[in-house]
Amino acid sequence: MNNNRTRGISGLTLLFGIVLIAIIYWFVGNPGSQEAPYTYRDFQNGVKEDQITRVEIRQNRVAPTGTIRVQDKKDELHELHVSDVNEIQDFLDSYDVEFEVADVPQDSWVVTTLLPTLLMVGAVLFVVAMMNRQGGANAKAMNFGKSRARMSTELDNKVTFAQVAGLKEEKEELEEIVDFLKAPGKYTQVGARIPKGVLLEGPPGTGKTLLAKAVAGEAGVPFFTISGSDFVEMFVGVGASRVRDLFEDAKGNAPCIVFIDEIDAVARRRGTGMGGGHDEREQTLNQLLVEMDGFGVNEGIIVMAATNRVDILDPAILRPGRFDRKVMVGRPDVQGRLEILQVHAKGKPLGDDVDLEQTARTTAGFTGADLENLLNEAAILAAKEGRVYLQQSDIRHAFIKVGIGAEKKSRVISDKEKKITAFHEAGHAILFHVLPDVGPVYSVSIIPTGVGAAGYTMPLPEKDEMFNTKGRMLQDITVALGGRAAEEMVFDDITTGASQDIRQATAYAKSMVTKFGMSEQLGLVNYDNDSDEVFIGRDWGHTSRGYGEKVASTIDMEVKRIIDECYVEAKRMIEERRDVLDRCAELLLQKEKITREEFEALF
Ligand code: ADP
Ligand code: MG
Ligand code: ZN
C-alpha cells in the first residue's frame, strides 16, 4: 500500500513536469524569432542602396501577407513581416533585386499536432490521477458511504492455523467455524444453527487478528476486514452506510468472513457517550445489529470481531443471534510462548547457544506480539554486529529493550515474585475446591494479566441464585483471604499483592453487617446508606452517616471479627493440605496455567 502510494506520487510529479515544460515551450515560442530590430524602412533603404544580395519571400497560403528574409552584403540575415507580398515583389522588381518565392515553412507536426494532443492527454491524466489519489488509497473520496473493507482471498498471503502458535483451545473452538465454512451443507442438512458472530476477546497483541485471518485461510474463503475506527467518521450516517455496504459485499461473496477489528470503537455501550452521546456511533451500531439480524442463519457469512474491552461493549451485541460465541484469547503460558518463539524464529538462523525454552520461561506476561518483537530486535542486533545468526546474548539484550516496553503493559516478573504468586493462587484455589458452596475451580494461572493482577484463580461461572446465604458469603471471604494465608504460611514475609483480595473481603463483610443483618451485635438494622456503592460510597457518603460513633465502632469491630475468623479458618484449611499447596504451586511454576482437571488431580 505504501509502495503504491509513492509510485503514484512520482508518476504524478513526472506528469506535472512534462506539462510544465510543454507550457513553457508554448509561451516562449519558436527560438530564432529573436532578431535585432530590423524595420521595413531599413529594408527599403537597403534595396535602394543596393545593399541586399538575396531576398526570400514567403507567402502565407490564403492572405497576401507573409514574411521576407533578407540577406545583405554583410551577410546578415533579417526577417520581416509584411502585409502584402505582391507589393514587395513589385518593389524588388523595380530595383532589380533577386528574390525567391517560397511557401511559409510549415511548423513541424510535432509542434502543431503532437504537442497540443499530448498536452490535452496530460491534463486529463493529471485530473484523473488527482481524483484517484484521494479516492484510490483511502477508499473512495467521491463515495463516502462505500465500505472501506479490504477483501483478501486465498491468493494474497494466506494465514493458516500453523502460523498461530499456542492458543490451542482457541483454535479448537474455531475449528468448528472453519468446518462450517468449508462444508456448510453438512450442518444445514441436520438443521444445525451455526453461530453468526464470534467475538475474540483478549489483550492487545495476543493474536486475535491473526487468528481471524487464519480461520479464513484454513477455510479458504474471502475475508473482509475493517476496523471499528473506520466506521466512526466525521459525517453522521457515513458509518451506517459503510456497514450496509460491507454486508452487501459480503453477501455477494458468501461463504465468507467479515472481520471487524477493534469493535469497541463502534459498539460501545449506547447512551453513555461523552458529550451528549455519539449519534454517529449509535447509528452505526444500530445498522450493524440490523445487518446481523438481517442475514439468514445459514447464509454462510460469519462475522468475527475482536476487542480488548469486552466490558465496554453494548450488551445488545452479545445477544444470541449476534456475537453468540465468545473466544477468550489470553496471554500465552510457557508452552505457548515457546511455540510462538519457534514460529518467529523461522528464517532466523539460531546459534548453538540459543535456548528458546529458557527465553520462554523468562518472558511471563509477554504477548505474541511482544515475543515477535523480541526476536526481531535480537535479529537486528545480530545484523548490526555483522553476524548471520542469532546468539543468546542478542536475545538477552533485546529482552532489556523490549522488556521495558512490555513492562508498561504487563510486567516482567522475577522468579521470586512468580513463586509467591504461585503459592498465593494455589491458596485461593484450594479453598475454592474445598469449601462446599464456592467453586469449582475452572483454571488457575500465574500469567500476569496486565491490569495489575499477578495471576488469577477462576471459578466456574456462578449459578443463578436469587440470594446469597450467610454461609456462602463467609466462604467467599475465606477464599479471598486464602491467597494471603498461603503466602504467610510459606514465606516469612508477606506482600502487597493481596490488597485487592483484602478489599473484596472487607466489602463482603461490611455488607453482611450493615446490609443483610447477619451480625448479632447489630441486628436487623440497615446501616448501609451508601446506596449499594460499597466501594466509592464509603468515601463520599461519610458526612451523611445515619448513626452514631458507637454504632460505627461496633460495625468496624464486627467487620474485623468476621475477617479474622475467616482468616484463621483459611489458614487452618490450607495447612491441612500443605502437600497439595506445594504441589499445586510447583505445577503452576512449571506450566503457569493449569486446568480444572490438572488441579483436581492434585487431591
Ligand atoms: P491482536 O489482534 O490480538 O492485537 P495480532 O493478531 O495483531 O494481535 O498480533 C500481532 C502480531 O503478533 C502478529 O502479527 C504475530 O506476528 C504476533 N503474534 C501474536 N500472537 C501470535 C501467536 N499466537 N502466534 C504467532 N504469532 C503471534
Ligand atoms: Mg488486532
Ligand atoms: Zn489473591
Image: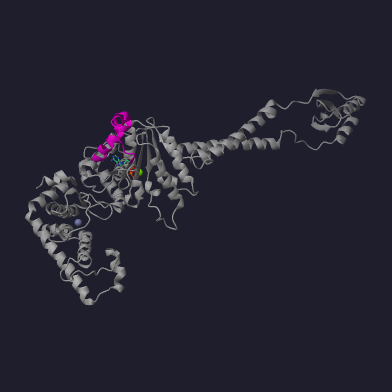
Magenta span includes 337: no
Which residue in the rendered view is the most extreme toward the right?
A: 94
Judge from the rendering whether residue 412 lies leftward or rightward of residue 21; answer left or right.
Answer: left
At horizontal 70% and vertical 37% (from top left) the residue drawn is 28
Which residue in the rendered view is the most extreme toward the bottom?
A: 549
Query: Which of the two residues, 585 or 530, is positioned nearer the viewer here?
Result: 530
Please provide the residue range marked out in magenta: 169-197
Q: Quadrant of residue 124?
A: top right
**In what quadrant does ligand 2 lie?**
top left
Secondary structure predominantly adopted by residues drawn in magenta: helix
Q: Quadrant of residue 374?
A: top left
Judge from the rendering whether residue 576 lies leftward or rightward of residue 99; answer left or right.
Answer: left
Q: Relative to residue 163, is residue 530 depicted above or below?
A: below
Q: Relative to residue 83, is residue 507 depicted above or below?
A: below
Residue 428, given in percent of the width and then of the height, sits at 16, 54
Residue 207, given in percent of the width and then of the height, sits at 31, 42
